[in-house]
Image (cartoon, helix red, strand yellow):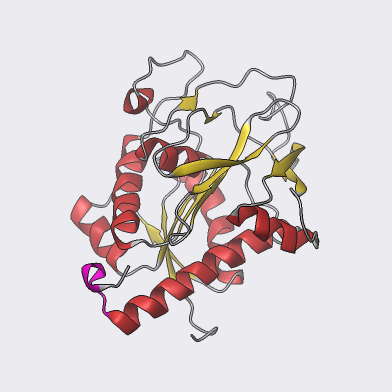
């Protein structure tokens, strides 16, 4: 397998708000590039057919954050007054990209809203508004260039745990890392085939999920590693692991044929 291959990573436009997307999308794209991939923006204004065509050319899916919240009707809940308005175009694009990745067993990496989107697509549920003494989201007036941080403990015997242990040079056990935090929702019940793999130790808020089945890389984190990629080794490590999985997926599918139905289990 060539380590020089740059896997194509589909990234939906984060939000229908063009100003927000223009500000944050470059961070995700640069992290993917620096980790060895080729980022491919998927315009959420595109038709389902156009999105599907783009997805076919990509080796993995990165689901970015968003100021929107997933429509609670999708997980059978009544909307909480604190829940932000859904972004229908982003939801529709995510569903198409996740479906393609699921069908083809492509790697998926969900960040913040992206983690919640993945969990709901897998029939999981969300906490619509976190009530905790731990500050998980920026208070009103908080400077945009400052980041809240708090500790997270990752379960040792998991894919994410192994990635984090290697990043902080910890041989065994459950790694404890410091993460940035800017979310008011979190996973409640993990979706089908997903498990909780990290929590905030002070209040138990879910901070990461991953696929139970090890043959497909699917990880969601509640924090934003794209924001700290340049100076934080755990942030770089998770992007590298995602790109390595996409590179492996590309190599295997090209060797065996592009039709997933022909691949051996």
Which residues are the magenta region?
257-262
Residue 119 drawn at (x, y percent): 43, 39
For residue 96, side relative to residue 174 (left or right): left
Q: Is residue 259 part of the magenta span, yes or no?
A: yes
Residue 255 drawn at (x, y percent): 33, 84
* Residue 207 or residue 38, whichever sits in front: 207
Residue 66 drawn at (x, y percent): 49, 40
Residue at left 42%, top 37%?
A: 191
For residue 118, side relative to residue 103 (left or right): right
For residue 147, side relative to residue 12 (left or right): right
In the image, residue 27 sits, relative to residue 190, either above or below, namely: below
Residue 144 drawn at (x, y percent): 69, 39
For residue 18, side relative to residue 173 (left or right): left
Q: How many marks?
A: 0
What is the quadrant of the C terminus in the image? bottom left
Residue at left 56%, top 70%?
A: 33
Q: Hey, which quadrant is residue 226 in on the image? A: bottom right
Residue at left 35%, top 46%?
A: 94
In the image, residue 47 sits, relative to residue 88, either above or below, namely: below
Residue at left 28%, top 57%?
A: 103
In the image, residue 247 sits, relative to residue 242, either above or below, namely: below
The answer to whether residue 231 is visible is no
Residue located farthest toward the left when viewing the structure as drawn: 49
* Residue 168 or residue 140, whichever sits in front: 168
The answer to whether residue 124 is visible is yes
């Amino acid at each position: 397998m060539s380590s020089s291959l740059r896997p194509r990573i589909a990234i939906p436009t984060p939000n229908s708000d063009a100003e927000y997307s223009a500000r944050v999308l470059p961070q995700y794209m640069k992290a993917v590039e620096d980790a060895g991939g080729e980022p491919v923006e998927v315009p959420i204004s595109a038709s389902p057919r156009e999105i599907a065509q783009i997805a076919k050319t990509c080796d993995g899916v990165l689901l970015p954050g968003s100021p929107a919240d997933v429509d609670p009707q999708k997980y059978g809940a009544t909307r909480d007054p604190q829940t932000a308005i859904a972004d229908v175009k982003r939801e529709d694009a995510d569903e198409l990209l996740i479906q393609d990745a699921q069908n083809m067993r492509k790697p998926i990496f969900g960040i913040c809203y992206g983690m919640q989107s993945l969990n709901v697509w897998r029939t999981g549920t969300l906490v619509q508004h976190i009530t905790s003494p731990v500050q998980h989201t920026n208070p009103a007036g908080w400077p945009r260039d400052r980041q809240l941080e708090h500790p997270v403990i990752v379960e040792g015997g998991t894919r994410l745990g192994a990635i984090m242990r290697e990043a902080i040079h910890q041989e065994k056990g459950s790694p404890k890392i410091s993460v940035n935090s800017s979310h008011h929702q979190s996973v409640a019940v993990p979706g089908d085939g997903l498990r909780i793999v990290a929590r905030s130790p002070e209040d138990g808020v879910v901070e990461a999920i991953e696929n139970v089945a090890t043959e497909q890389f699917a990880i969601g984190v509640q924090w934003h590693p794209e924001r700290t990629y340049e100076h934080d080794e755990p942030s770089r490590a998770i992007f590298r692991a995602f790109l390595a999985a996409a590179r492996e997926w590309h190599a295997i599918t090209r060797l065996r044929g592009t039709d997933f139905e022909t691949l051996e289990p």
